[in-house]
Amino acid sequence: MTRPHLWIRAESRPTEQRVPIVPADAARLIADGFTVTVEESPTRIVPVEEYVEVGCSVAPFGSWVDAPEGAVVVGIKELPEDPSDLQHTHVFFAHAYKGQEGAEEVLERFRRGGGELLDVEYLTVDGKRVVAFGFWAGYVGAALSVLRHRGLLDGGVGPMTREDLDERLRGSTPAEPERALVIGSRGRSGTGAVEALAVAGCALTRWDRADTLVLDKPALLDQDILVNCVVSLGAGEAFVTAEDVDVPRRLRVVGDVTCDVTSEANKLPVNTQITTWDEPVRRFGGDEHPLDVIAIDNLPSLLPRESSETFSAELTPLLPDLADRSGPWAASLEWFRRHVHDAS
Ligand SMILES: NC(=O)c1ccc[n+]([C@@H]2O[C@H](COP(=O)([O-])OP(=O)(O)OC[C@H]3O[C@@H](n4cnc5c(N)ncnc54)[C@H](O)[C@@H]3O)[C@@H](O)[C@H]2O)c1
């Protein structure tokens, strides 16, 4: 059976420590007949030596541009701006099909070079995404919300380990547990949020779609912490609006994992901007009755090891189908064809 040459490229963002395939999974792929090359990277959470130990070849940073024909270049976030023409097959999150900023230029680079994009976001089975970072987004989003509520998050944040995070959560549980509500609790990020809040010892309420058809706003405002994990189509009442800031309420911290901040689907219209690693919290209302919102849109990068392991565990079993572009690869390829060829 044909096994493509997989080329794990270094990420170009200096803050990105994640990797799409971890050494344990690279070992399985090699045993299954794949050739795996890994680029050197100054930021990756996993040292290159761990890849060498399992039989991967090492290549210099950014050398995917000269990877052999037929090699499949695998990454997570955006490609660097050079080269202008893309000749290889690339697997990563390109964010190129919804008219995002820079999307047309990315597609044009593939058109010019004759390359192929197999966007991870569009790897689906029966219409459902099969590789995603949601769990750890929810986990770290909920954890930061708890730390903020406990007065333990004043400055910026950066990549951390789950062990350290859990230690901070477990070591700060108050005598009377905070009330925490997760909306979208059945989803990937909702599941992660529920787990983090359990580690933190919070008194937990879970709502999913059926529970918000008629929104119980007083119950929502009577929580200490709200973590929003929905995939929203915009229908139904918003969860927290600007008007709610002035209403007497127990709610103090909102963790917006969904981060639909500039979209019409935003269920938390009280806030319309993302927050950042440097300034994770935006405060609404006065200091007497504050409402703190955390809306970081790259949460999984804050837990790079766990995010990489989960991503790799989901991606690796799909790779045998890559050679003939079957299964979820066919679905992703169809998106590419529609946007690159049919549109040109
Ligand atoms: N901030 C980040 O870094 C980050 C990272 C990954 C994902 N996300 C975002 O998080 C969101 C959730 O992603 P996911 O992978 O968990 O999605 P998912 O599809 O696994 O789960 C979404 C859940 O929301 C529920 N839901 C939808 N509308 C609802 C409503 N009105 N009320 C209550 N529940 C509702 C669904 O039933 C489902 O259980 C997405 O918008 C995604 O883009 C953000």
Image: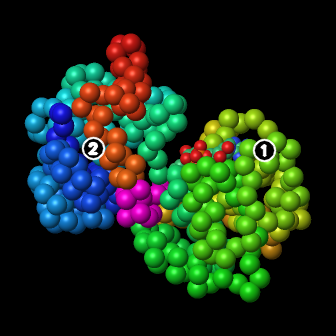
Residue type at mark 1 is: Ala
- Decide which of tag 1 and tag 2 comes sooner along the chain: 2
Residue 139 in picture, x, y percent from top left = 55, 63
Label 1 element class: helix
Marks 1 and 2: which is nearer the front? 1
Residue type at mark 2 is: Val
Image quarter where the C terminus lies is top left
Which of the two residues, 341 or 109, is positioned nearer the viewer here?
341
Which contiguous range is marked in magenta? 298-310
> Which color scheme does this rendered protein use?
rainbow
Task: Name the quadrant containing residue 50.
Answer: bottom left
Secondary structure mainly formed by the magenta segment: helix
Q: With respect to residue 287, does 235 lie above or below?
A: above
Query: Tag on residue 210?
Result: 1
Task: Name the quadrant containing residue 3.
Answer: top left
Query: Tag on residue 74?
Result: 2
